[in-house]
Amino acid sequence: MNVLDEVMDHKNFKEFSKAMTEYIAEYLENIRDRPVLPTVEPGYLRPLVPEEAPERAETWQKIMGDLEKVIMPGVTHWHSPRFHAYFPTANSYPAIVADMLSDAIACIGFSWIASPACTELEVVMLDWMGKLLGLPKEFLACSGGKGGGVIQGTASEATLVALLGAKAKAMKKAKEEHPEWSEYEIVSKLVAYASQQAHSSVERAGLLGGVKFRMLPIDEKYRLRGAPLREAIEKDKKDGLIPFYVVGTLGTTSSCAFDVLTEIGPICQKEEVWLHIDAAYAGSAFICPEYRYLMEGVEYADSFNFNPHKWLLVTFDCSNMWLKDPSWVVNAFNVDPLYLKHAHQGSAPDYRHWQIPLGRRFRALKMWFVMRLYGAENLRAHIRKHISLAHQFEQLVQSDNRFEIVAEVLMGLVCFRLKGSNEKNEELLKMINGRGKIHLVPSKIKDTYFLRLAVCSRYSDSEDMEYSWNEIKQTADHLLNNK
């Protein structure tokens, strides 16, 4: 017998996995009973574990026994109905089971031949999802054109990948028009644009790509409109720069604002500038036809990205990206050593050329499991329920004249504040999170500090909105009555 099988054979594995499955199910079904935020201090874990790895094998029963002692005291419970920070991170039983199978198959799907099912299921799943969202057919592999989709790790990666594709395209054009220019001269002239409310990873993509990035002013609804973009492009061209890339955000992190694609898109088309759409959180809502008006103008985009791992019940990591012409990305990333070549190159995507890492997991499995086991109608019901809960919380805030709503509630996010100073709201948030019953994070736009409440858990219901509002209201009572 293999020495490793002596420690964990198939019989032990089945017992261990059964025990873990029961533990996970119990954890998730009773997550509401756990304090949402840990109370530990930095460094809490080291005294709870040995200083060195064990020399002799331990039993799985001992590991299971240590979970509540070592791990759970330091866990922030993102799937608690009382967790309202950031945006959701998706979770569901079908996705968990799919990840188990993906881990068991354990292929590294960098090329078609490395595991044909890994590549081919991904192609089909991105077509399924693209159709659910109502994306233009030019993005879909099944349309017979150039377009197609790929699963990236995060929206941050997708933004950088699109920027590098746009950079390659712009450099080729500049070199053809000015053969005397060096690559360094061309890169020094490239400039990209996004809203001031775009995610920090957008600006970071500019740093990693070695190009200038202009963050443009927003309107009264915190959206990027066409006029500031047009003005910036005209000025930069006048100054001898080369506009090449624009990121339009559908659902900003601070307030879930939607940039106006119908104004931005035609400018990008006219100026031959690559338009990338970052819909990381809100893109999930486009499976519901009634919310697709928010992506009107998407036909102007060269690339589109959203995260099923945020709001569509697919576990992290699973960021869907579509490209109308992937060749700019493929050619930019194409390093093709002999040991990675195969006889079927060109007949199917080799996804290593569509992304920054070489290796990739079999992530399409969890999309397949989730879409089949829930069906589109239940996925839509999940999105609609979260949006309905956000509107319920909005009404609770509006019922108390001490508070105000800061941004229009369109998705599962409510931005609100106590009327008055930023300092008062900072103190309110500190007290709320200090009590540990719910968890919120703040944001700030145009010098206005406010609190964000995101509906994050698939277990959230109407009573949880009432609970969270009562916690906020009671904390505000305590704050204001002691002033």
Image (tube, rainbow, N blue to C red):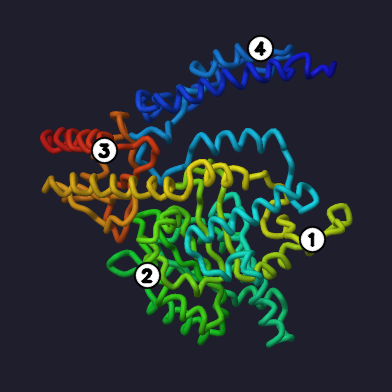
Pick whichever of labels 3 and 1 is earlier in the sequence.
1
Residue carrying label 3: 462
Please name the amino acid that badge 3 sits on.
Ser
Residue 372 pos. (x, y %)? 54, 45
Please name the amino acid that badge 2 sits on.
Pro
Q: Nearer the viewer, mark 4 or mark 2?
A: 4
Q: Residues within 10 Å of mark 3 (few under 14, many from 20)?
A: some
- Label 3 with label 2: CB-CB less than 8 Å: no
- Label 3 with label 1: CB-CB less than 8 Å: no
Q: Nearer the viewer, residue 321 or 12?
A: 12
Residue carrying label 4: 59
Q: Is residue 223 above or below residue 6?
A: below
Pick whichever of labels 4 and 1 is earlier in the sequence.
4
Q: Is residue 108 above or below residue 151?
A: above
Instruction: Give the spatial CA distance, label 2 vs label 1.
Output: 39 Å
Q: Nearer the viewer, residue 53 or 128?
A: 128
Please name the amino acid that badge 1 sits on.
Val
